[in-house]
Every structure is written in structure tokens, then in C-alpha cells.
Amino acid sequence: MRDNQDQIAVSGAPSPALDDTPARLRFRDDAPFESPIAPLADFLAGGNFAAVRIEPGEDARELVPHFDRLKLVEIAFPKFRDGRGYSSAAVLRQAGFTGEIRAAGDVLVDQIGFMRRVGFDSFAPNKPLDPKVVKATLDRYPYVYMKAADGKVPVWALRHG
């Protein structure tokens, strides 16, 4: 019999403290955005922020009308097994957000490739990641099987046009 330990840990886990330091791993050519990051409620209340943090369970679609003033959306991962942040990043990219999307918190190296596919382009993991391992992880599979936010051409399209 399986207990509910995973669900309790995910839903009850505190998010990492807001950390305005730049991402430790970044896949963008523009200058890093270095400014205070507001919780979603403060951002939506009309604060003068260009960066916002989304916690698990918060709706990323609330940011769509504010894309013109947003430069960074940081998405919290209090536990690696809580995948709601993937959906938030995908929603933002599908809605046309071109700014930086950062994964912050319990981010593991084996998640980086999947996170890149849905639209994350910077990372602030709780524990530092070895750059050589990150590169090897991202280079492991040169082909993808479906379209995603990263714009990679699926292998079937390479074969059949």
C-alpha cells in the first residue's frame, strides 16, 4: 500500500526564499536581469516590478496582460517532484512571453533538458550543478519527437519534411 508522503511533501513544502541574485545557469544572450522579484500577489496589486515569482498552484495566465512590463518570471520548485512549474512555463511561452523564465529551487540536472523544452532559459537551483554534467545531459539526445517551446525540429519532420 502506498502512502501519501509525496503529495504531502509537495503541497506542504515551503518555497525557497525569494532570491534576487542572478541565475546560476543561463541560456540567454541578453544581459541578466538584476532587480527585485515580486511575489505574484504584489505584482498584480500594481507594484512597480519587472520581475515576478510564481509559486506552485498560482496561475501563470494572470501575467499575460502584463507581458509589456515583464522581463523575468521566476517559477518556484519547492520539491523536484512537483511538476506544475513546467505547465506555467509552457503557458507563458505559448502566450508569447519572450522574457527570461527561471526555474528556482529544487531543480535537478536530469530535469534541465525537459525544462529547456517547455521554455525555461535560466536556472537557480538550490544546489550548484556541475556545468560538465549539465552539458552532457543536454547533449545526450540530439533529436526530439515533438514540437515544444524550444523550437527544435522533431525528428519525423527531418525525415519527412
Image: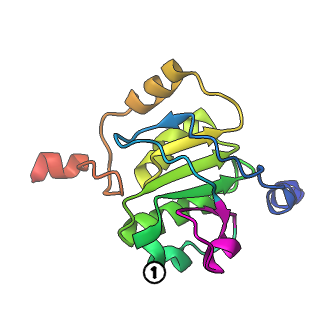
Closer-to-camera residue (52/47): 47
Residue displayed at 90% across by 57% down:
3
Badge 1: residue crowd in 10 Å (few <14, some 14–19, many ≥20):
few
Left or right for 131, reference 105 = left
Q: Is residue 23 above or below residue 39?
A: above
* Residue hosting label 1: 65
| Residue 123 figure quarter | top right
Q: Which residues are magenta?
A: 38-56
Q: Is residue 64 above or below residue 152?
A: below
Name the residue type under label 1. Pro
Closer-to-camera residue (22/49): 49
Q: Is residue 64 magenta?
A: no
Looking at the rendered image, the quarter that the N terminus falls into is bottom right
Instruction: Find numbered disc 1 in the image and state the secondary structure of the residue it sits on.
Output: helix
Residue 26: image location, x then y, percent:
47, 38
How are the residues colored? rainbow
Closer-to-camera residue (86/55): 55
Q: Is residue 48 magenta?
A: yes
Residue displayed at 69% across by 73% down:
42
Residue displayed at 57% across by 40% down:
22
Tally of marks? 1
Residue 63: image location, x then y, percent:
52, 75
The residue sitting at the top extreme is 132
The residue sitting at the left extreme is 161
Residue displayed at 58% across by 70% down:
48
Q: Is residue 7 above or below residue 78?
A: below
Residue 11: image location, x then y, percent:
81, 63
Closer-to-camera residue (4/36): 36
Residue 79: image location, x then y, percent:
74, 49
